Amino acid sequence: MTKSPLSIAVLISGGGTTLQNFIDLRDSGELHVDFKLVISSRPSAKGLQRAAEAGIPTMVIERSVNPDGLFSKQITDALRQADVDLVCMGGFLSMWIIPPEFEDRVMNIHPALLPGFGGKGFYGRRVHEAVLEAGCKVTGCTVHFVDNIYDNGPIILQRAVTVHEDDTPETLAKRIRKYEKVIYPEAIRLFAQNRLCVEGRRVRILESGN
């Protein structure tokens, strides 16, 4: 881990459970980060309250009231001003057009094993419903770098979860969330240690000390 905390911003649209996990791990000393900013695309997002209670600066940039170009520009400008090392999406449901300066500096977690069950409209319960309808025996979660296509960027980490015969979208989501809470922080730690090397579509994890 780097000596100084990794400066991060978190983008949210809803409850902020991923954000809360990060906050809890920071407070317990398991995640060495400095939260510079939380941006929400919705003013009603519960995650804003979580951020405020943790003393993290917040900003609301609504997709619904901003044309595409302006929405993305406002987010980019805010992140530049916050001077962050890494941007983490946590249930962020709007498309932010990522400029070149943030390439390989934006992460997201998806509740399935990409490239399957990803793309526009595939989030939350919809993903688990699709997995069950397809009769999959295995699903899981994926942490990936974000590009300007939904769920398309290079994969960093994945964990597999067995699908049970009696699973519902809710039971499946609950088991997957346990792994999400582990692999997303791990990806952040690897980034902070400069151990993620992106080579085209692949991410190589370097040995510690390289």
Image (cartoon, rainbow, N blue to C red):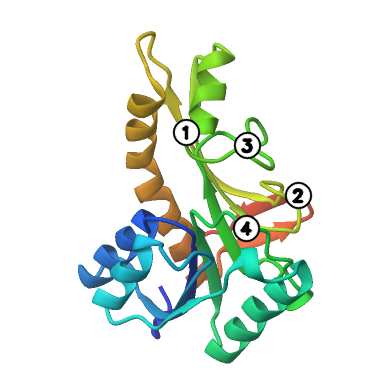
**Alpha-carbon distance for marks 3 and 4?**
19 Å
Q: Is residue 129 above or below residue 174?
A: above
Q: Is residue 196 above or below residue 135?
A: below
Dot 4 amino acid type: Ser
Relative side of 111 to 156, left or right: left
Q: Secondary structure at mark 2?
A: loop
Q: Is residue 123 above or below residue 80?
A: above
**Which is nearer the N-term, disc 1 or disc 3?**
3
**Which is nearer the N-term, disc 3 or disc 4?**
4
Q: Residue at x 29, y 68 (%)?
A: 50
Residue 201 circle label = 2
Image quadrant holding the N terminus, namely bottom left
Q: Residue at x 53, y 59 (%)?
A: 207
**Alpha-carbon distance for marks 1 and 3?**
16 Å
Discs 2/1, front = 1
Dot 3 amino acid type: Leu
Q: Is residue 209 visible?
A: no
**Alpha-carbon distance for marks 2 and 4?**
23 Å
Discs 1/3, front = 1
- Please rate how many residues cluster around mark 2, counting C-alpha atoms within 10 Å: few if below 14, some from 14 to 19, many from 20: few
Q: Secondary structure at mark 4?
A: loop
Residue 114 circle label = 3
